[in-house]
Image (spheres, helix red, strand yellow):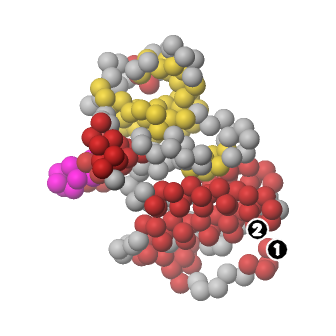
Amino acid sequence: MAETKELRKQVSLQNISSSPSSAKNPGTRIGPYLVGKTLGVGSTGRVKLGTHIETGQRVAIKIIGKAALLEKYAKDPVKQRNMSQKLEREITLMKLIQHPNIMQLYDVYETDRDLYLILEHIEGGELFDYLVKRGRLSESEALGFFQQIIYGVDFCHRNHICHRDLKPENLLLDKHLNIKIADLVWPVYNSPHYASPEIIRGIKYDGTASDVWSCGIILYALLTGNLPFDDENIRRLLAKVKTEKKIQFYLFI
């Protein structure tokens, strides 16, 4: 425990010399990394390919606008400051985490406007796309993936980290089809299909229990190719998550 506290003191966000606008463009630098093509765009920011100038190591550079992260608390400076501090603490802790089923965070840079997360480059794509192509998985393949997911989630929980947004889109696959849990540092929950009833109701919830709920939804999706709670209408979807007691699992097996 003392060693972990000391490590936390040693890790801090760093400033970068590039301006926020130029650092987002291919051919420019973020620290020792050369910015390449865009790999993807998500709800929390865009991801670009990066290459270490000296070693040639490939990384994923996630660029997040600070304003977008804290927009929800724009009218409450105290909450905004607390959320900013919480985010920095979680990033600091994530830099210490090393696990075969968790996407590694190598480094973090920042400007006044943006955060730049230097992440492990995972080339196999999302578990979501893998599942869409196959419809549903065999029991043995689903079990193999699920064991890796639980292995990584349990490690997070034992280190007092809750994901809060577990879903196939946040589970990446390397070239050997090993699971890598991504997007661990965002204190938001954006996916109603995988959210626990407590989150949907907007009441106080246990982050670890909510992660376990999400894992159950993921296992269901892997085995059936469907979601247990689904509806094109968001209000009906939320009502199903809050009120439905029984899932007719046998219909899909």
Does any portion of residue 123 appear in the rendered image? yes
User: Predominant secondary structure in magenta?
Assistant: helix
State how far apart marks 1 and 2 are (Cα).
6 Å
Mark 1 neighbour density, 10 Å: few (under 14) some (14–19) many (20 or more): few
Q: Is residue 222 above or below residue 97?
A: below
239 sits left or right of 207 in the view: right
How far across and down, in percent of the image, does residue 103 sit?
54, 43
- The residue drawn where x is 74% and y is 63% is 143
49 left or right, relative to 68: right
For image coordinates 57% across by 17% down, the residue present is 56
Q: Between residue 42 and residue 102, name the one nearer to us.
A: 102
Question: Which quadrant holds residue 204?
Answer: bottom left
Which of the two labelled residues, at mark 1 and mark 2, occupies the earlier sequence position?
2
The image position of residue 70, as x and y in percent, is 30, 48
Q: Amino acid under label 1?
A: Ile
Magenta-span inclusion, residue 21: no
Residue stretch in magenta: 76-84
Residue 80 location (% of width, % of height): 23, 51
Residue type, numbered disc 2: Thr
> Residue 79: within the magenta?
yes
Looking at the rendered structure, which numbered label has been put on residue 104? none
Mark 2 sits on what residue? 224
Q: Is residue 123 above or below residue 205?
A: above
Residue at the outermost left position: 78
| Residue 253 badge | 1
Contact (Cβ within 8 Å) of mark 1 with mark 2: yes
Q: Is residue 235 visible?
A: no
Foreground of the two, 158 or 129: 158
Q: The residue tagged with tag 2: helix, strand or loop? A: helix
- Write the residue at 80% across / 62% down: 140
Few, some or many residues within 10 Å of mark 2 (<14, 14–19, 20+): many
Quadrant housing residue 142: bottom right
